[in-house]
Amino acid sequence: MADIGQILKNARKEKGLTLDDLQQTTKIQKRYLIAIEEDDFDSLPGKFYVRAFIKQYAETVGLDAEELLAELETVNSAEEPAEAEAKTRTEAVKREENPTSPLIEKIIHYLPTIIIVLIVCAILGTIYIFAWGDRSKNESTQIAQTSQKVSVSSDTTKQSSSNSAKKTSSQKESSAKKATSSASKKNTKKAKQTLTNTAASGSLFTYNLENAPAKNKIELAVSDGATAWNAVSANGVQVWQGTLSATSTKETVELPENTTTITLNLGNSKATTITINGKKFDFLKENDSLTVRTITINVVSSSTNE
């Protein structure tokens, strides 16, 4: 793995690039670039970003990214058995240092069976207690019904009046619940996705994306007879770049879940059309005379996917 960082570093120096130059081009933070060159991959956010950063670094300095990633996978595969073997040896040493007596070993061996037996006994005991309680309750009820005689006529009149009042009250409650449910449904309508321009300076534009899903999808295409180089980044990591033409199909880029910042670099914005989550992004209304522009989209809030 140490060879990967040195290979990338040497290629960068041969290109005459500094870490600051590389940071400006790839949008990868300088501290992550230093960690890659020093083979400190544990300092990177995760495995996805390790592969993404190495691929982007390699492509920028003119190296074969797939070859480096294959080497990375080979080294990782070789390290995992070694780590497993070391763990096994450590456990063996611990067992030798802390030997277990035969009696304790037998108890540990039969412990799952003992636990299951205790659980079954507890369940059966609970069932018996409840069954005995129900039987006693039924006997008490039968005795009370046999010993009591009540007047039917007056109680029937009172009960009828009481039932009528309860029925009227129940109807009112039902009407109130229906009205509340209807109002709740109206208030819980899903908010629509909005994209608002918040800043513009030269060829740099900033937007706020509100009520977007947790996982966003961007589609790019160009008009007839035109070509355009474009790039898409998520949280400062470039996830796609390429040149689109009228003869090629549109490019669909699915961003990582819960992305908070989206960056679009457009080489020919006049000929480029962009759709975000199925809705057209009309970015040309902010200065339609520009050809090259950089768009930063801050994902303000997220909602459930439709």
Image (cartoon, rainbow, N blue to C red):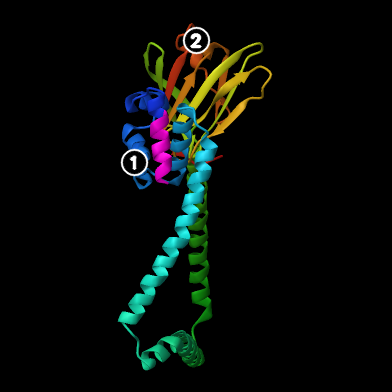
* Residue bearing the label numbered 1: 38
Q: Looking at the picture, which amino acid does disc 2 mark? A: Thr
Q: Say if mark 2 contacts mark 1, CB within 8 Å.
A: no
Of pointers 2 and 1, the one earlier in the residue sequence: 1
* Residue bearing the label numbered 2: 291
Main SS class of the magenta portion in the image: helix
Residue at left offset 52%, top offset 14% = 269
Residue projecting furthest to the right: 247
Q: From the top left corner, tell me how far across and down residue 206 is, in percent.
A: 39, 21
Choose top left, top right, bottom left or bottom right for residue 210. top left
Is 208 rendered above or below residue 6? above
The reply, left or right, for residue 11 in relation to residue 70 is left
Residue at left offset 44%, top offset 21% = 295
Badge 1 element: loop
Choose top left, top right, bottom left or bottom right for residue 104. bottom left
Residue 139 numbered mark, or none: none
Query: Can you tell which of label 2 and label 1 is closer to the viewer?
Result: 1
The magenta stretch is 1-11
Residue 5 part of the magenta-drawn span: yes
Q: Nearer the viewer, residue 162 or 303?
A: 303
Badge 2 element: loop
Q: Nearer the viewer, residue 260 or 72?
A: 72
Q: Looking at the picture, which amino acid does disc 1 mark? A: Glu
Is 159 rendered above or below residue 9? below
